[in-house]
């Protein structure tokens, strides 16, 4: 299961739409490692007009790696996080999360990061089992 959904939120979803704030809070509580990592890269991307920041440190355990996979493999979760933090998220190798400011999307650094070449250059023997 990707998210721990409180009964009240599930009941609200069954009756109709939930707000982005309610959804994003559920993600924050359910996937704390992913939330903290994405919060960090988003904040660093906005610092000093960097336009881009990433994380290259593998998660400390499979549980944390699973949180990242669940957060970034779901269109709804990824989209909610992108709207909340005001960034475009990109993902490589089960742990390399990058945040790009909207103004940097489709720029050279973004295109290089999401390219097949970028993926291949980010491979290493340590990451093959992730």
Image: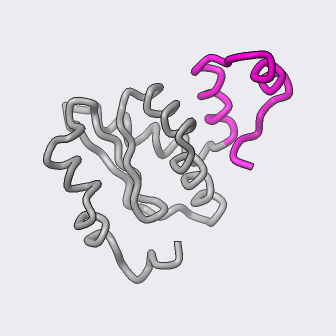
**In the displayed structure image, the side of residue 118 where residue 29 appears, left or right:** right
Seen in the picture, residue 21 relative to 130 is either above or below; the reply is: above
Q: Position of residue 65 (x, y in %)?
A: 57, 60
Q: What range of the chain is rendered magenta?
A: 1-30
Q: Residue at x 75, y 22 (%)?
A: 13
Q: Residue 109 lies in magenta, yes or no?
A: no
Examine the image and state in which quarter residue 47 appears.
top left
Q: Nearer the viewer, residue 128 or 29?
A: 128
Tell me, what colour scheme is on the image? one colour
Using the image, determine if residue 109 lies above or below residue 101: below
State yes or no: residue 2 in magenta.
Answer: yes
Q: Is residue 18 left or right of residue 54?
A: right
Residue at 53%, 61% in the rendered image:
59
Q: Which quadrant of the structure image shows residue 83?
A: top left
Report how many numbered discs are placed on residues in the image.
0
- Residue 111 rendering spot, x and y as whole percentages: 21, 50
Residue for point 76% across, 39% down? 4
Camera-side residue of 114 and 100? 114
Q: Position of residue 57 (x, y in %)?
A: 42, 61
**Residue 70: image location, x then y, percent:** 60, 51
Left or right: 117 as drawn, with respect to 89 = left
Secondary structure mostly taken by the magenta-highlighted segment of the chain? helix
Relative to 98, say whether 25 is above or below.
Answer: above
The residue depicted at 43 percent of the width and 33 percent of the height is: 82
């Amino acid at each position: 299961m990707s998210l721990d959904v409180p009964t009240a939120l599930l009941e609200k979803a069954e009756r109709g739409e939930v707000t982005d704030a309610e959804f994003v809070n559920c993600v924050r509580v359910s996937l704390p490692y992913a939330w903290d990592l994405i919060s960090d890269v988003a904040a660093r991307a906005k610092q000093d007009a960097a336009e881009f920041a990433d994380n290259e440190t593998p998660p400390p355990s499979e549980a944390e790696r699973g949180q990242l996979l669940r957060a970034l493999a779901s269109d709804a979760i990824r989209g909610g996080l992108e709207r909340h933090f005001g960034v475009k998220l990109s993902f490589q190798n089960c742990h390399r999360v990058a945040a790009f400011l909207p103004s940097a999307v489709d720029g050279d650094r973004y295109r290089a990061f999401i390219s097949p070449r970028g993926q291949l250059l980010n491979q290493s023997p340590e990451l093959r089992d992730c």
